[in-house]
Amino acid sequence: YVCGGGWYQYLKTCEVYDTDQGYSGVWKSVPALMLQGRRTFAYASIGPTLYAIAGYNGTYLTTAERWAYELNIPMLLK
C-alpha cells in the first residue's frame, strides 16, 4: 500500500500493488481516501488498519488518520 503524494502533490488517494504477478504486477486504486491530502508522513499498517500520521500539505500537519479494510487470509487450523 502507498498513500499520499510527493514534492508538490498532496494526494488523498491510496494504491496497492498486486504481488500475485511478481514483478509484472500492477498498481490498483483502493477505496481508502485520506481526509487531508499529505506527503512525507509516517505510515503504518497494523492488522487490517492503515494509519497516516502527521506530514505536510503546505503546512506541517499534526493530525493522524486511519482506514480499515477487510482482509481475507486463509487460515490453517490443526
Image (cartoon, grey):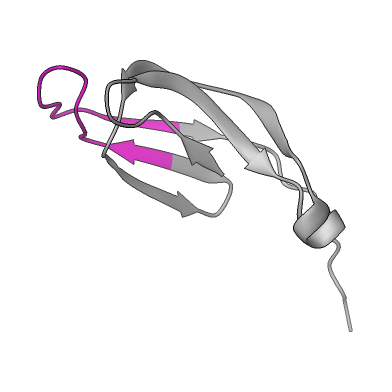
Q: Is residue 73 visible?
A: no
Asked if the stretch drawn in magenta spans residue 50, the answer is: no
Tell me where residue 23 appears, x and y as whole percent.
76, 59
Residue nearest the viewer, comparing 63 with 10: 10
Residue at point 27%, 21% (across, down): 8
Residue at point 84%, 68% (across, down): 75
Compared across the picture, whether 39 is left or right of 59 comes to right
On screen, residue 34 above or below 67: above
Tell me where residue 25 appears, x and y as whole percent.
79, 49
Compared across the picture, whether 4 is left or right of 23 comes to left
On screen, residue 61 above or below 53: above
Region of the chain picked out in magenta, as a range = 51-66
Residue at point 48%, 51% (across, down): 45
Tell me where residue 28 appears, x and y as whole percent.
71, 32
| Majority secondary structure of magenta residues | loop
Tell me where residue 6 appears, x and y as whole percent.
34, 32
Q: Residue furthest bottom?
A: 78
* Picture quadrant where residue 52 is located: top left
On screen, residue 1 above or below 22: above
Compared across the picture, whether 26 is left or right of 65 comes to right
Residue nearest the viewer, comparing 51 with 78: 51
Q: Is residue 78 visible?
A: yes
Residue at point 89%, 84% (across, down): 78
Count the marks. Answer: 0
Quarter of the image where the N terminus is located:
top right
Asked if the stretch drawn in magenta spans residue 62, the answer is: yes
Compared across the picture, whether 51 is left or right of 40 comes to right
